[in-house]
Amino acid sequence: MIVISGPASTRLAERIAAEMGVDSLPVEHRIFPDGESYIRLAGSLEEEVAVIVQTTSPPQDNRLMQLFMMAITASNLGAEKVICVVPYLAYARQDKRFLEGETLSLEIVIRLLDSAGVDELIVIDAHNARSLEDIQRRYRINVVNLSAITSLSEYLRDEGYGGAFSLAPDKGAVGLAELGSVVLGDGFGFFEKQRDRRTGNIEMDVKDLDLEGRDAVVFDDIISSGGTMSLAVAGLRRQGVNRIAAACTHALFRGEAEKKIRDAGANNIIATDTVETKFSRVSVSKIIAQHLKKFIY
Ligand code: R5P
């Protein structure tokens, strides 16, 4: 097995290679003056299991193109199997046609990876596991969705949030809060969120959860603009919650996201290294390495 460090995930790729005790293949990468990517896989992949690690956080389209280039080149260089570790999978939120004529972006990404000859795609906390499963059934590629929520919760427990309530900012994330509560121990619940499909604006129905004086952790898959997380944190603050942690797997943090969440009253913000940021306290390298062991024979 050889780990190929995609330009978007060099540190995570190194961590995975170190966990597995396998070599990593350097990738030569440049951006031409007009914005196109140059990629060279500098080494032999003959009869190897090639594990390409490349997250697809912004700039998503460039990173996806680099991923396709690496996957097809790995096959061209004779790799026996091509596995793509894409810890943050871009376009996963557009998994349905919410308005007539919309593109099914998630399916397009899966279809392109499938036609690039990728044998297995490994993602972490996909936005909607069910849609991903439904889509992958239509293709040859095997898609594996692993979760980092238990690792995030263990980190939070060790940082003093043991016994905290686990909250999902919307119904779609309730599975994450449930997983968090297994480690943190004080139950879980969710608020209700509505998003205007045309403007993107969100509103949140904040239920009274009787949490006065208790600690709480809000779990979400993604923090992007920080709108969802800040509304949930503010809702908890109004209920007299003691300490509040904002936890997510994928920290995109666009614009004023951090300020919004802190101004809403969060005491801590934590995330994984699916997207490397200053909030990355938990690495997903062990979870991925554990899964990849099945390919070492
Ligand atoms: C959507 O349902 C996701 O689970 C997240 O809640 C959402 O992507 C977060 O985006 P933002 O930070 O822009 O509110």
Image (tube, rainbow, N blue to C red):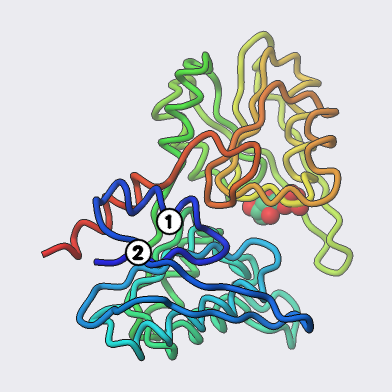
Q: Is residue 96 above or below residue 179?
A: below
Dot 2 amino acid type: Val
Picture quadrant where residue 242 is located: top right
Dot 1 amino acid type: Ala
Q: Nearer the viewer, residue 75 or 188?
A: 75
Extreme residue toward the left, this view: 297
> What secondary structure is marked by label 2?
strand
Q: Is residue 182 left or right of residue 191?
A: left
Q: Residue at x 24, y 66 (%)?
A: 1
Q: Is residue 209 left or right of residue 12?
A: right
Extreme residue toward the top, this view: 213
Q: Nearer the viewer, residue 9 or 31?
A: 31
Residue for badge 2: 3
Residue for badge 1: 13
Extreme residue toward the right, this view: 199
Expressed as whole percent of the image width and height from the top left, the position of residue 93 reads 63, 65
Ranked by sequence position, the earlier of labels 2 and 1 is 2
- Distance between the alpha carbons at the discs numbered 2 and 1: 7 Å
Q: Is residue 170 above or below residue 128?
A: above
Picture quadrant where residue 246 is located: top right
